[in-house]
Image (cartoon, rainbow, N blue to C red):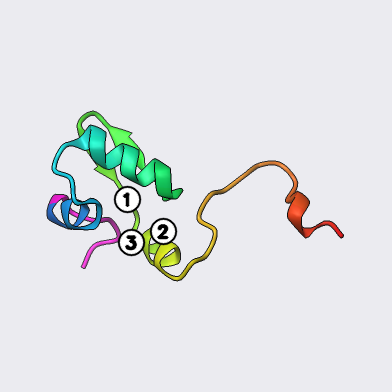
Amino acid sequence: MTEYLNNQELHQLTGYARSGQQTAWLKERGIPHRQDGSRIIVSRVHVQAWLEGKNTISSNGPNWAKIA
């Protein structure tokens, strides 16, 4: 098993075959990914974190929710 989802797994995850629709689906759910031409790169680690309900969106700024 590789670190990244293959095309079939990405289609299975999103329910879409077209990269534009897959990208929109991933963005809507906050799953980090990269577009390389028509190919979408998605890490299994990020998908697993999303399935577990963990925050997958990274930010360079402060986490204001953690400040009491």
Residue at 45%, 65% (x, y): give it.
49
Question: 12 and 59: which one is in front?
Answer: 12
Q: Are marks 2 and 1 in contact (CB under 8 Å)?
A: yes
Task: Tell me, for residue 46, which label it has, or none.
Answer: 2
Task: Tell me, for residue 42, which label it has, or none.
Answer: 1
Residue span colored magenta: 1-7
Compared to residue 60, the image places residue 36 above or below, namely above
Q: Let me know if residue 32 appears in the view.
A: no
**Per the image, is 4 magenta?**
yes
Question: 18 and 40: which one is in front?
Answer: 18
Could you say which quadrant of the image residue 25 lies in? top left
Q: Which residue is mark 3?
A: 44
Residue at 35%, 46% (x, y): give it.
26
Identify the amino acid type marked 1. Answer: Val
Q: Are marks 3 and 2 in contact (CB under 8 Å)?
A: yes
- Helix, strand or loop at label 3? It is helix
Q: Is residue 47 left or right of residue 17?
A: right
- For the residues marked 3 and 1, what is the alpha-carbon distance in whole angstroms? 7 Å
Residue 61 in the image: state x and y as whole percent: 71, 41
Residue at 40%, 41% (x, y): give it.
27
- Helix, strand or loop at label 1? It is loop
